Amino acid sequence: MEAEQLEELINRRRRQLTVHSFLYYQLNTNIISDNTFDAWSKELAQLQTDYPEIAAKCVYAEEFKKFDGSSGFDLPYHFPEVQNTGYKLLRIVKKKPRG
């Protein structure tokens, strides 16, 4: 995988994990399974270990320095962009017909 692809993946995983941590820890709800969250967490932790120089250039670099994939409790879900995205996802999920 090229550096640009790795950076994009790290950014995506960090954003996903912060938003879903906000939903889980602050709103007591989830829209993904625990298995999915755990898989994303483990993947991100490994990427950060394998590519620290790329991870240091990605979004929320400081907040994810000590992230080991074990929990999303202390992730930076207090940022307005994280909370706004979380509320937006909830509105989308609530509009979807269940089948």
Image (cartoon, grey):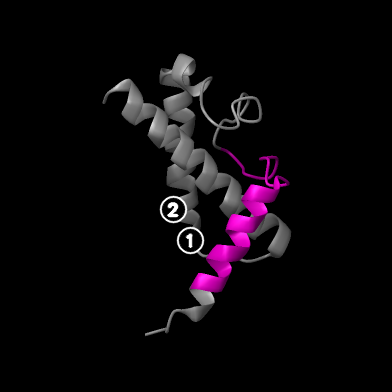
Left or right: residue 50 compared with residue 19 = left
Left or right: residue 5 compared with residue 47 = left
Query: What percent of the width, then of the height, locates residue 69?
Result: 54, 36
Q: Secondary structure at mark 1?
A: loop
Q: Which quadrant of the figure contains the C terminus?
A: bottom left
| Crowd tier of the residue under label 2, counting other residues whose Cα lies within 10 Å: few below 14, some 14–19, many 20 or above | few
Left or right: residue 5 compared with residue 32 = left
Q: Observer-nearest residue: 49 or 9? A: 9
Q: Amino acid at mark 2?
A: Thr
Q: Is residue 30 visible?
A: no
Is 48 situated above or below 26? above
Q: Which residue position is annotated with label 2? A: 36
Task: Tell me which residue sits at (51%, 65%) in the image.
Answer: 31
Task: Tell me which residue sits at (53%, 64%) in the image.
Answer: 89
Q: Which residue position is annotated with label 1? A: 32
Q: Observer-nearest residue: 92 or 71? A: 92
Residues drawn in magenta:
70-92
| Marks 1 & 2, CB-CB < 8 Å contact | yes
Q: Observer-nearest residue: 37 or 97? A: 97
Task: Tell me which residue sits at (49%, 23%) in the image.
Answer: 55
Q: Amino acid at mark 1?
A: Ile
